Image (cartoon, coloured by chain):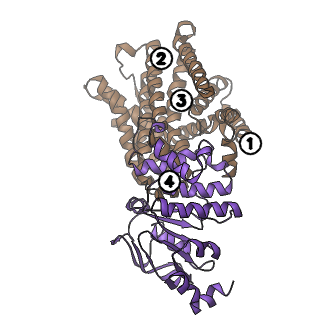
Amino acid sequence: MFKSIVRTKWFAVVAAIFILLFILPLFAPRFFVYIFALIYVTSLLAMSLNMVVGYGGMFQFHHAVFYGVGAYAVALMLTKTSLPMWVGFIAGPIAAAITGLIIGWFCVRLTRLYFGMLQISLGSLIWAIVFRWYSFTGGDDGIHGVPMPSMISSLNSSYYFILIILVVCLILMYMIIKSPFGSTLQAIRDNSQRCEAVGINVRRYQLGGIVVATFFAGVAGVLFVVLEKSVFAEMLFWVLSLEIFIMCLLGGWFTFAGPILGAAIIVALRTFVGRYTEYWTLILGVILILVIFFLPEGVMGFFQDLFKPGAKEAVERK
Amino acid sequence: MLQVEGVTKSFDDFMAVNGANLTVNQGEIVAVIGPNGAGKTTLFNLITGALKRDKGRILFKGEDISELPPYEICKKGITRSYQIVNIFPRLTVFENVQVAVLSYQRRSSNLFRPAQSFAVKETRSILESVGLLNKEKNIAGSLSHGDQKILEIAIALGNEPELLILDEPTAGMSPEETQATIDLIKRLATGRGLTILFCEHDMDIVFSIAQSIMVMRHGETIIQGGLEEVRSNKEVQEAYLGGD
């Protein structure tokens, strides 16, 4: 009984937040609307990473590649082909998921750090191709002025589009994490050896997790193009991968909403502190050190532990 | 049901299992005994596919399973528990067992329906039969050692095995927990009709539940036979029972 009340309370809080975000463009300055939209895009990217890192326990060090592939796929489709625009929008996530399938197919054969190293190498290879292939990808210039359907071409309309897609993706991701597939993935993270012993083909599920996560990274890539109408090779660079990894760490990678918080913190830091000094990462560094020492489960994880005793001891025992 | 024929496994120069033989018949409770380092756990790892044998054959219901990966062997009907607790520490007790039941029901890849709605009855019935139902919502990592060892067995039951392999099921347990576990194993054998293969250091336990005993030393099988046959065997007395 108590639990169901807590649940409805939580639901009310979440709904209130989304209503607030929906009416934001009515009163907030354009700049804030833009920053919020950027936070949504980045949140989706960080949450997709968290599906593999936090829930799957795989060291997907170079996740930004799939974000970039999704963005480039839609940008190239919209600028270089005359196919209907919606085809381009669908092509983004699918291209990202296929790239995830190919890279993941090699990576799941390795474990832990070796998985991560191979993932960085294969991802960097794709970055190098995008960075160098001027005639096709525009090289380090990127692609600018990607045409958008008039429905979502203004800042406010793209804000709504991004928010709606984000909400849909959040619901889907939540369902996936709570599904049998999601709990199997978490079981593999906890103990892959035991999973094999109860009849689970671990590599296949890990690969499945990667494909799902890279699909959502591709969606985030598409949303970035909707917001910026441009793509850059930096979107596939390892520095961004590190940044989203930090977002998960900061927000809490065993929590569902943690990466959103992490993304909001980092985007806000970069925007507001970055205005005064280009060394904003120094502040990020200090925050990160404090989080690692005092909130090892991330900011969100810390609050969750307050409400769920027992989870913390389990971690310490491990 | 299970035949292990001349199976060998070496780690670099060390022969962990050296031509071991073992027969487990349907419905039997078989114990593997031997001093520390005799190769009992390695033998179990070979049977369940966690390790690959160098030589020899492992037959389950007449089929050679020695080349299969662990998850395929599990699907054939062999599951195991571990000597050192090997559970999912961050998941709840319920989820620990449910993972195995979902895998058995081939529902693990369902993407969009909540896991809570699947395999609830089966999972609860397993938890009830091992006496953990009142702790189903606890985080597995926070259970006592004894309960975690029981959870070990419960997870192994999730796949409805025909052959259950228990690696030192009572290691580290208090006398009361040990007695409860012995009763549980007996209940599983008679109630569920499971064939059980286990290893154990405590000779009282072995002689109170096993119907057939296989004795290992230095990775070799000294003898396999009934309780009296093993007890009266000179080589066994010298190697193991007498030396205690």
2 or 3: tag closer to the N-terminus: 3
From the top left corner, tell me how far across and down residue B105 is, in percent.
39, 48
**Disc assigned to residue A293:** 1
Q: Are marks 2 and 3 on the same chain?
A: yes
Quadrant of the rendering where the N terminus of chain A is positioned: top right
Q: Secondary structure at mark 2?
A: helix
Q: Residue at x 48, y 48 (%)?
A: B99
Parent chain of label 2: A
Parent chain of label 1: A
Q: Secondary structure at mark 4?
A: helix
Parent chain of label 4: A
Tag 3 residue: A43
Tag 4 residue: A115
Q: Alpha-carbon distance for marks 1 and 3? A: 24 Å
2 or 4: tag closer to the N-terminus: 4
Say which quarter of the image contains residue A274: top right
Q: Alpha-carbon distance for marks 1 and 2? A: 36 Å
**The residue under label 2 is which amino acid type?**
Tyr
Measured along the vertical axis of the image, is residue A215 above or below residue B52? above
Specify whether residue A61 is in view: no
Label 1 neighbourhood size at 10 Å, few (<14), some (14-19), many (20+)?
A: few
Q: Alpha-carbon distance for marks 4 and 1? A: 26 Å
Q: Alpha-carbon distance for marks 3 and 4? A: 24 Å
1 or 2: tag closer to the N-terminus: 2
Q: Alpha-carbon distance for marks 2 and 4? A: 36 Å
Q: Nearer the viewer, residue A267 or A18?
A: A18
Tell me the shade of chain B. purple
Asked if labels 3 and 1 touch by Cβ distance under 8 angstroms, the answer is: no
Q: Secondary structure at mark 3?
A: helix
